[in-house]
Amino acid sequence: MRLFPDLKSAAVALVSFLACATAAALLHAESPPTAATVKGSVHSIDVPRADNVAMPAGPGLEAYNANCVLCHTNRYVLMQPKFPRKTWEAEVTKMVNVYGAPIAEAQQREIVAYLMSIRGKETPPVATSPAPSAGGDAPTTK
Amino acid sequence: MNPAKNLPLPRRDFLLLTGGAAAAALLPSVSAPGRDPVAAPPPGGSANAAPAEMVRLPEKTDLLLVTDRPPQLETPLGMFTQDLTPNELFYVRWHLSEIPLSVDLAAFRLKVGGHVETPLELSVEQLKKDFPAAEVVAVNQCSGNSRSFFNPPVAGVQWGNGAVGNARWKGVRLRDLLAKAGVKAGAVEVAFNGLDKPLLDKTPDFAKALPTDVALQPNVLVAYEMNGAPLPILNGFPVRLVVPGWYATYWVKMLNDIRVTTEKSQSFWMEKAYRIPASARANETPDKLDPNTVPISKMNVRSFVVAPAEGGDVSLKQGIEIHGVAFDGGSGIKKVEISTDGGKTWADARLGPDLGNYSWRRFRLDWKPKAAGAVRVMARATSNAGETQDDTVIWNRSGYMRNNIEHVDVFVS
C-alpha cells in the first residue's frame, strides 16, 4: 500500500499523526488509571468478571461447566491452540492429580471429548525438531 | 452467561472469592462482535488475536486481557518505549483461582522464621523505618513469556512477548532481614509464600524457594516500592520479592512469609513446575524429552524490536527510527545489532541509559531504507558475559526461556 506518493502528502500525514498523537496523549492524561480504594488502612480494588465469552456448544459441555469454571475463567481454555488428544488428557489429569479438582473419571472423559471438539487436533504430533524459522507459524495439519 | 450459574459454590465461599459486591459486576463486553470463540487463536496468543481484547483494571491502563479469573494482563509490545515501564502498564500474572483484592496495611505482617535464631514479624512501616533502603532497576519477565510462539504449541498461558517489564524496585535487602533474624548453620533454602491462597484445599499453594546463597545476594530485595510508588495490588501490594536477573516466578507477590529451611522445598511449584531441561539452552524435542530437569533460574539474553510494528509501513524517503529493548540475566547489555537485510549484514544500534546490569537497555537506530519492498528487521543482543542471541528457536515442554533473534516484517514504499 503506497501511503505517501509525495513529500507534501507525507508532511500532511505527519502533522495529522502528531495532532492525533497529542490528542490521544491528552485524552490518556484526562483518564488516568483508577486508584485503589483506601478506607482507613485497607487498600482494595474490584476486579469485575469478564466471562462474556461463552463456551461454544459441543459434546461434554455440561461436564465442562460443572467442573472447570469453579477454578478459572473460560478464557484459560479458549486461549489455547489446538492440541492432540494426548495433550488434553494430560491437562485434565493434571487438574485432577495436581490441582485437586474433584472430577469423576467418567466426567474427565467427557471433558476431554469436549476439549477435543473445540480445540482438538486429531493428527498425531509431528515428531521432529522444531523448524528453524523464528516467529511461530501455526502448526499445519496433514 | 450468568457467572453465578457457573459457580456452584457455597454462598460463603462465593462472597469470599468475589468480594461480595463485585460478584455481580461484569466488565462491559470488550470483544468485538463476530469474534469466533471456536477458532483457536493464531500464534502470539492474546497479543495477536484479532481483534485484541483490551481491559482497564484498577491501577492499570488499557492492557491486553489474558484472563479475568485470575486477573492476568499483558502489555502490548508497542508500549515498551521507556527506560522504566510505568506501573499502570506493567503486566499482571497470578497462578491461583482468585487473588486477595484487599489488604489491611496496618494489620499486615511479614514473618521471617524457620531455621533462624530470632523469628521476626514486621509491618511495612517497620520495614521502611528499621532497615536501610536499597534500590535496584531490574527486568521482571515471566518464565513463559512468548509461550504462544512455541511450535509445536505448549499448553499454558498463551503469552505474546509482553509478559515483561522494567522497574526501579525499592525495599529492604533480604539479607538484612535474614541477618536480623540470624540464619542458623545448616540452612539450605529460603522459602517464600504470599497472601494468595488456593480455592481448593488440595491445590498446592503458590510458594517458591531460593538456595540460601542466592537469597543472601545483595540485590535480592523485599520491595515495597515500584517506580517510586507503592506496588499496585495486581503486582503484589504491599511487598514482593525481587530477584534481579532471575525469572519472575521467584518474585513472590504479597509476600508475607519467609522461612529458612534445612531441606529443599517439596512444593509442587518448585519440584514439578517451573523446571527446564538440564541440557544446554533449555532445549529438548517433543519425542525426546530431557530426562533431567532443573529449576528455572537466570534469564538468558533477549531483545525485542518495539518499532516499527509488525506489518507496518515505512517511508522510503524518510526512513524510521528502529527501537526496542534488550536485557539479560545480570551481566548487562554490551551491544545490540540491527539487520534490515534478513541477517546478511548488521549495524550497531545506539544504546540508551545504563540503569544497571539488571535493567533493560533501550536501543535505537535511524534507518534509511535503500529500496522499496518487503523488509525483515531483526535485532540481536550480546551481553557483557558474552551471550549472544541467535536463530536457534528452542523448544521445551513448558514453553519457557524463548530468546531467539526476533524479527519484524515491514513494507517500505
Image: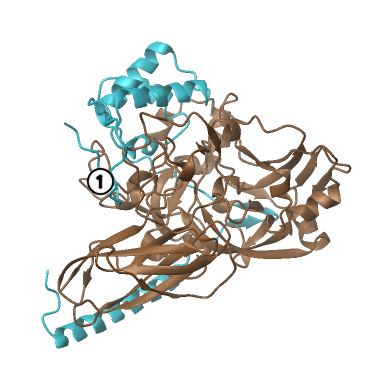
Chain colours: A cyan, B brown
- Res A33 visible: no
**What count of labels does the image hold?**
1
Please say if B210 is above or below B200. Answer: below
Query: Does A132 sit above or below residue A81?
Result: below
Image quadrant holding the C terminus of chain A, namely top left
Task: Looking at the picture, tell me which residue is in the foreground, B329 or B235.
Answer: B329
Please state the horizontal and vertical placement of residue B305, each as a whole percent of the image.
Answer: 36, 64
Quarter of the picture containing the N terminus of chain A is bottom left
Q: Is residue B184 above or below residue B375?
A: above
Extreme-top residue of the structure: A106
Seen at 79% across and 64% down, the residue is B132
Q: Residues within 10 Å of mark 1 (few under 14, many from 20)?
A: some
Front-most of residues B124 and B253: B253
Inspect the image, locate mark 1, and give the three-letter code of the amino acid beneath it.
Asp
Quarter of the image where one finds residue B373? bottom left
**Of residues B159 and B254, which is closer to you in this image?**
B159
Q: Give the SS element for disc 1.
A: loop
Answer whether residue B317 is visible to the viewer in this image. yes
Where is residue B182 drawn, in percent x and y? Answer: 86, 47
Q: Quadrant of residue B407?
A: bottom left
Q: Kindly identify which residue carries mark 1.
A: A137
View extreme (right): residue: B117
Q: Position of residue B80 (x, y in %)?
A: 42, 65
Residue at position x 57%, y 57% from top? Answer: B232
Say which of B158 and A137 sits in front.
Answer: A137
Q: Residue B147: image x %, image y %?
A: 39, 44
Chain of the residue under label 1? A
In the visual, does B263 lie left or right of B31?
A: right
- Residue A46 in the figure: left or right of residue A77: right
